Amino acid sequence: MNDETSSAARLLSLSVVVPVFNEQESLVQLIEELNGGIGQSVSQFEIILVDDGSTDGSWSVIRELSQPANISGIRLRRNFGKAAALTAGMKVASGDLILMLDADLQDDPAEFPALLKQINAGFDVVNGWKERRLDPWHKVYPSKVFNWMIGTLTGLKLHDHNCGLKLFRAEVAREIRIYGELHRFIPVLAHARGFRVSEVAVNHRPRQHGYSKYGVRRFLRGLLDLLTVTFLTGYGRRPLHALGSVGLTFLALGFLGLGYLSALWIAMQTGLVTPVAPIGNRPLLAYSIAASLLGGQALSLGLLAELIVANTNRTTDGYSIRETTTSIGNN
């Protein structure tokens, strides 16, 4: 029996990681829904509530809810962001699977069996898809553009990369590192390391309490993080391939321009061409010199980046092992 069959045949343990930021009104109902929607599908589960610097009474509620053995709370010293809160929760998670969802009750815990079904089908990451999204238009339409950009640049086409409801195997959390706003790119980062990613349409509910933390700044940060993820997944271990390509392109353009001007100057000196304007007054000279300098700088940065990658202790290997035969490591 292979690993996929055996994992599907037994009940897996689950760690639910919930980042919390000023959501005191939602927490009691969230725990009730999690207990009702998860208990029948896994052998055992734990709930980890991570207070990301809340300024309301969220931590007091978390302390009261943490009386059962399977519910625990973590309080960060200040608001570090959702990625940091998720990382703190995943570090102490003990389950075979990790379910992440938001604390605002818009993610429905009753969707867990549908996500688990995809895991048992052999996938490593299951991303929620808010097919009927109950958010204002200024969140919906930019999100559609953002999802299209992610799929185009990374090759992983999902309808809703930013959905807060995600289920994945514990080894995914061990192999990827999220910071900044990279929590929305967990499927992309996992896909880049060879994990199998799927998505499931899930129920999206209107916000009942509090207010949305979404804003223009978050969208702009997301665009910058998309560039980061595109570079990390495509060239993170071979930066010279990206910077070198840019450098060689500009060097070629610069040398072509300078070569043309040199040939023109020689032709003008020998009388083969009638002078029209001095070489030094032509814009092509400035453009060619600038392109040559830019190309040289890009190549230099690429070489420096290669040295850093080669001589820095890496937090993750450049590969991901799916399975081994039983004899590996037993000698």
Image (cartoon, rainbow, N blue to C red):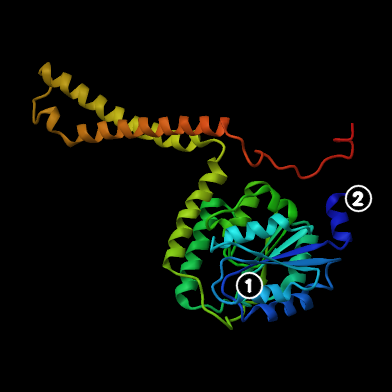
Q: At 73% from the left edge and 79% from the top edge, which residue is drawn?
A: 33
Relative height, residue 13 to residue 295 (above, below)? below
Disc 2 element: loop
Question: Residue 59, which numbered label?
Answer: 1
In the rendered image, is residue 157 in sight? Answer: no
Pinpoint residue 68: horizontal percent, then vertical percent.
Answer: 80, 73
Residue depicted at 85% across the width and 59% down the height: 8
Drawn side of residue 5 relative to residue 101, left or right = right
Name the residue at the bottom extreme: 208
Kind of residue at badge 1: Trp
Residue 319 position (above or below residue 63): above
Is residue 177 at all visible to an observer of this figure? yes
- In primary-sequence order, the first of circles 1 and 2 is 2
| Observer-nearest of 29 and 252 | 29
- From the viewer's perspective, is 18 left or right of 243? right
Q: To which residue does mark 2 refer?
A: 1
